[in-house]
Amino acid sequence: MTQLALVIDLNVCVGCHACVTSCKEWNTSGWAGPMTDQNPYDADPTGTFFNRVQTYEFGTYPNTETLHFPKSCLHCEEPPCVPVCPTGASYKRPDNGVVLVDYDKCIGCKYCSWACPYGAREIDEKQRVMKKCTLCIDRISDTQLPENERKPACVLACPTSARLYGDVHDPDSEVSVAIREQGGYPLMPEWGTKPANHYLPRRKTRIHIHEDELVRVDNPLKKEGIKPVETGETLDDVAW
């Protein structure tokens, strides 16, 4: 059976959010819309996004690293959101493995969001139905589009080609080769959900920064004769 999925290369994702905005643009104007936003940020956010990019910084200054981690529905092969749905609104397509929600059946009970260990389900505050990534099912199944355009909007928009798309059950597909050759892994496999989406792990790089490299040669403060802030100093310690 075909299982369509995304493979995300964490080595080249730059956190530009092109995938987030292109997803929003395509799906808001399509059958999955309107994806209502009232307060998408802050401490208590509301708003519907099919794709989010979370950014983390780790390490000890100056040897720190930044990781951009895109998250969306993983289109699990054993989706826990499907059997808990009391109306059958959540279902998995047998022809391509994409997990979808039938809005006509959804009553917004949120059972699917409680069952999903990845936090991929969100409620649309206007329509009062649960929503999630559809893998742009209306686009990938549109035979009127050229074959090279039958891909999710996020894949087409990614400027660094960090997002791959294809059939993970086909051993010769681009996604399967990437998973096999680059150690691709599913997110939290211990839950037994068999996520179809995979991530390509970051290759460890070591960057050695010397103290004299922490102050730029073209620092405008030098031109003005102003002492820059050294490591460990505060602005109060600097003689202006």
Image (cartoon, rainbow, N blue to C red):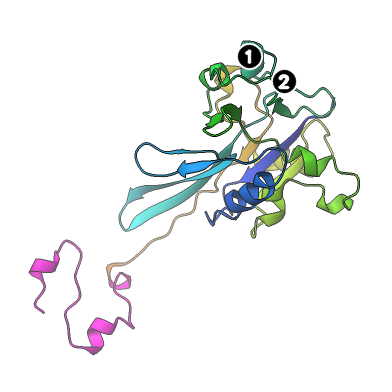
| Whether label 2 touches label 1, CB < 8 Å | yes
Reply above or below: 136 against 80.
Answer: below
Residue 188 location in percent, x, y? Answer: 55, 26
Q: In the picture, residue 198 is in which quadrant?
A: top right
Horizontal relation, residue 121 to residue 206: left or right: right
Horizontal relation, residue 29 to residue 187: left or right: right
Residue 130 location in percent, x, y? Answer: 59, 27
- Asked which secondary structure carries label 2, the reply is strand
Q: Amino acid at mark 2?
A: Tyr
Residue 152 among those drawn in magenta: no
- Asked which secondary structure carries label 1, the reply is loop
- What residue is rendered at 55% in x and 17% in y? 109
Q: In the picture, residue 94 is in which quadrant?
A: top right
Residue 233 among those drawn in magenta: yes
Reply above or below: 154 against 159.
Answer: above
- What residue is rendered at 90% in x and 44% in y? 143
Give the magenta range: 212-240
Q: Residues within 10 Å of mark 1 (few under 14, many from 20)?
A: many
Name the residue tied to disc 1: 85
- What residue is rendered at 17% in x and 83% in y? 226
Q: Residue furthest right?
A: 144
Name the residue tied to disc 2: 91
Kindly identify which numbered label has been placed on residue 152: none
Quadrant containing the N terminus is top right
